[in-house]
Amino acid sequence: MNTPHIQVHTLTFPKALVTLLAGALFGFGLSLATMVQPEVVIGFLQFKDWGLMLVMGGAAGLAMLAYKGFPRWFSRPLLGGQFLTQPASWNRQTVIGSAIFGIGWGLSGVCPGPAIAALGTGNTDILWALGGIVLGGLAHGLTARD
């Protein structure tokens, strides 16, 4: 069967603008929810601060609604292309990677998205965590098998 080639990485000005605005809104939301403060995240992970549970639950619910609903409501994405799905596969590497991510998140109170947003708040101590995230990504890239 011959499938058409999909150019999902064609960057146009409208796509770049929407991406920039979505990233800014995401960073603002993380900052407003105090997810850019590692001590607040650690309090959440220790079950002392339930406010972030509401933030994360709301975000997960909206993401699921958009992920499942948009392909039903629209014939194609608003900025062109087509809706794509990513099949999930659980294997040993996924479990190990998830465990390493969780341990790093628990020890530092830093997740990649909030870490980048924290730079915008002037928190330069976060650079240590970002360095670890970059090294982890590099290690994965060098050891991953297709």
Image (cartoon, helix red, strand yellow):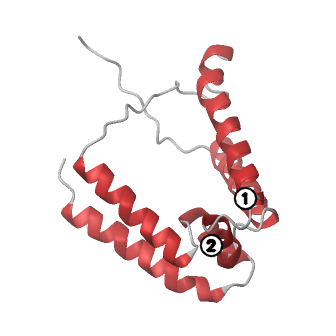
**Residue 6: in sight, yes or no?**
yes
The residue located at (67%, 27%) in the rendering is: 78
Whether 22 is drawn above or below 52: the answer is above
Q: Residue 33's x, y, as percent?
A: 78, 62
Q: What kind of residue is marked 1?
A: Leu
Left or right side of 68 for 143: left
How far apart in space, not on screen, are marks 2 and 1 (Cα)? Answer: 10 Å
Q: Position of residue 79 (x, y in %)?
A: 64, 31
Residue on which the image places disc 2? 42
Direction right: furthest residue? 32
Q: Residue furthest bottom?
A: 125
Mark 1 element type: helix
Q: Earlier in the sequence, mark 2 or mark 1?
A: 2
Q: Residue at left 36%, top 67%?
A: 137
Callout 2 touching callout 1 (CB < 8 Å): no
Query: In the rendering, at what x and y percent does residue 60 appear?
Result: 64, 42
User: Label 1 belongs to which residue?
Assistant: 52
The image quarter in which residue 42 lies: bottom right
Is 119 placed left or right of 32 in the picture? left
The quarter of the picture where residue 44 lies is bottom right
Q: Quadrant of residue 122?
A: bottom right
The picture places residue 138, in percent across and down from the top left corner, at 32, 70
Q: Amino acid at mark 2?
A: Ile
146 versus 62 height, above or below = below
Position of 38 relative to 51 (above/below): below
Which residue lies at the image location 46% right of the left edge and 36% below the top edge? 8
Mark 1 crowd level (few <14, some 14–19, many ≥20, 10 Å Cα): some
